[in-house]
Image: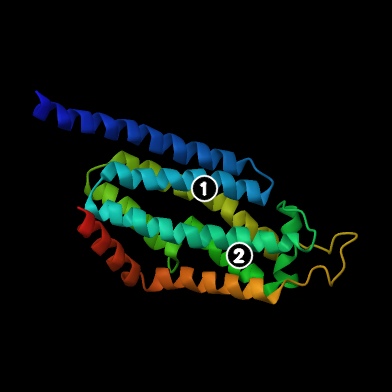
């Protein structure tokens, strides 16, 4: 009885995790869509990313576990970079709504470019670490036969395109002026912070173009644990 009960129990847990993954992805994305604050959008979207990780957990294969490792590393870089750009903007006493990003591409070309890269990676577009991360997650789920979960995950990822690329649109396609009471000097971003974020951006690109290094490390680590 014990031996026959274990697979059933495991399947029940996977079904529960399936439901949690769908709810987490969907609720996170829907809440992110409602935000006007960029920081709050990123915070809610992180819930959706946790849902993507759950997709791999449902799959449960060695490839899926390696995908979780890779995804966690990639998201740490993307999330740190995006929040970092907004944090150094706080030094210029600038609020954090989408409207406040208007004209940011002209005023701060390098940080705007890096923010664009982080947004594209969070969406999961090719040549970024986010693309490889989502590819690993969804491929692993598909290989294990979780077709509908994969479809829901991909649709949720497509939903995120709106609020992530909205950041890019406001930075480059909306005119903006320096807010009242904030001088040009206030808006000079610290070089050390920009340099650190540039390193993060390079790492995101590296994972998208040369993912083998981290993927091999993830595979070896998972193999040693299993």
Q: Are marks 2 and 1 in contact (CB under 8 Å)?
A: no
Task: Report the residue at 50% width, 43% height from top.
Answer: 47
Q: Give the SS element for disc 2.
A: helix
Residue located beneath label 1 in the image: 46
Position of 50 with respect to 1 (left or right) is: right
Q: Which mark is residue 115?
A: 2
Residue in the picture at 55% in, 60% down: 80
Residue 187 is situated, as x and y percent measured from the top left of the image, at: 79, 68
**Residue with the most extreme top position:** 1
Measured as percent of width and height from the top left, residue 165 is found at 58, 57
Assess disc 1: are there few (<14), some (14-19) or many (≥20) residues with their C-alpha within 10 Å of its C-alpha. many
Depth check, front residue: 170 or 190: 190
Q: Position of residue 102 (x, y in %)?
A: 74, 60
Between label 2 and label 1, give the one nearer the viewer.
1
Observer able to see residue 78 = yes
Residue 127 vs residue 79, the one in the foreground: 79
Give the quarter of the image for residue 206.
bottom left
As drawn, 28 above or below 178: above
- Provide residue 188's location: percent of width, then percent of height: 77, 72
User: Which disc, if any, is residue 118?
Assistant: none
Mark 2 and mark 1: Cα distance apart in space = 16 Å
- First reached walking from the N terminus: tag 2 or tag 1: 1
- Is 1 above or below relative to 180? above
Q: Residue at x 63, y 54 (%)?
A: 166
Lateral position of residue 195 relative to residue 213, left or right? right
Q: Secondary structure at mark 1?
A: helix
Relative horizontal placement of residue 220, taking residue 56 as reference (left or right): left
Q: Is residue 124 visible?
A: no
User: Which of the image's four quarters has the N terminus?
Assistant: top left
Taking 176 as reference, is 51 above or below it? above
Please identify the quarter of the rendering in which residue 134 is found: bottom left
Q: Is 195 situated left or right of 50 in this image?
A: right
């Amino acid at each position: 009885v014990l031996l026959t009960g274990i697979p059933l129990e495991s399947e029940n847990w996977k079904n529960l995790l399936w439901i949690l993954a769908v709810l987490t992805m969907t609720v996170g994305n829907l809440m992110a869509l409602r935000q006007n604050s960029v920081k709050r959008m990123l915070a809610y979207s992180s819930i959706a990313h946790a849902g993507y990780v759950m997709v791999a957990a449902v799959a449960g294969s060695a490839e899926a576990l390696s995908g979780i490792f890779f995804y966690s590393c990639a998201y740490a870089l993307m999330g740190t970079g995006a929040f970092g750009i907004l944090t150094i903007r706080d030094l210029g006493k600038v609020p954090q709504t989408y409207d406040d990003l208007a004209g940011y591409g002209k005023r701060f070309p390098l940080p705007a470019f890096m923010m664009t890269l982080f947004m594209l990676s969070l969406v999961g577009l090719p040549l970024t670490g986010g693309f490889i991360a989502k590819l690993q997650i969804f491929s692993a789920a598909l290989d294990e036969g979780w077709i509908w979960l994969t479809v829901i995950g991909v649709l949720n990822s497509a939903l995120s395109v709106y609020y992530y690329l909205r950041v890019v649109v406001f930075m480059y396609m909306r005119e903006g002026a320096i807010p009242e009471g904030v001088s040009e000097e206030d808006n000079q971003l610290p070089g050390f912070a920009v340099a650190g974020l540039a390193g993060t951006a390079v790492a995101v690109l590296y994972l998208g173009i040369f993912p083998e290094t981290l993927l091999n490390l993830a595979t070896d680590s998972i193999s040693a644990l299993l």
